Image: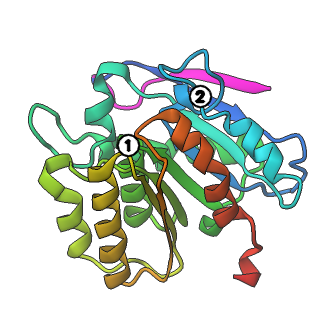
Amino acid sequence: MIHVTGPYEIVPGHGPKRHVRVYVPTRSKERERPLLLLFDGQNVFDDAPSFAGGWHAHAEVERLAKSVSPPVVVGVDHGHEHRISELSPFDFGPHAGRFPEMLDWITRWLVPKLRFEHRLTADPGRTVVGGSSMGGLAALFATLARPDVFGGAIAMSPSLWVGRGAMFRWVGEREVPQGLRLYLDGGGREQRMLEAATKMAELLASRGARDLRFRADPRGRHDERSWRRRLLSALRYHYGVARSQR
């Protein structure tokens, strides 16, 4: 069952209150469970709340559970017309970069709350943040900015064009913290996104990323169906092997 909680106010005076959706896998028996936090929560699970079909992440973690301990999946809803601003770390055009404020709310209030309510681990190595498009950009930024909370990122077709490539400049000014696991991808039918993701993977490697997986999906488009199809592979990369064996 998917539990819908909230609505919560993220940044006082900015954007609507929104819900947080939580799915605890049926085979999740650990005392300290892994966590997967995904942006655009309306798209994470079922089709009904989404604009163009859901990821069915609950079904994918149940498939994962056949071989490894699956994560609790948390979807943080977007703020509709405020989505671009709240998922962007950088100001651009008419959009204010509100994501640092959202990240502060997630790390300071939401994650501790979830840990208490669902027996989640405090180990960053088993705490992953992910998303697609603007959510992919936000997930990559969150992991690099707060490696003390998130030890892994799933950045699908990240919107690296934001701020005329501001993310490239930001990454180029810092070393990638050791121990992070980074997954990036892009689709062959979204050529500019794929080219940008390829360049970002190369930049991350040059800045010290050692545990990095890049996937070019020849059939991939910039849509929910493509991201849903690639999700299980990304989950296996992050959760499929015990940390001690990596």
Q: How many marks?
A: 2
Residue 226 location, x and y as percent?
Answer: 52, 41
Disc 2 target residue: 54
Disc 1 target residue: 133
Residue 88 location, x and y as percent?
Answer: 27, 43
Residue 95 to residue 203: above or below: above
Residue at figure coordinates x 72%, y 25% from the top left: 3
Q: Is residue 191 visible?
A: yes
Q: Secondary structure at mark 1?
A: loop
State the extent of the magenta-drawn residues as a range.
1-13
Residue at figure coordinates x 87%, y 56% from the top left: 30
Residue 58 to residue 116: above or below: above
Residue 165 location, x and y as percent?
Answer: 17, 57
Is residue 144 found inside the magenta-colored segment of the image? no
Three-letter amino acid code of the residue under disc 1? Ser
Residue 15 to residue 178: above or below: above
Residue extending furthest toward the left: 93
- Please give left or right for residue 18 compared with residue 173 in the image: right
Three-letter amino acid code of the residue under disc 2? Gly
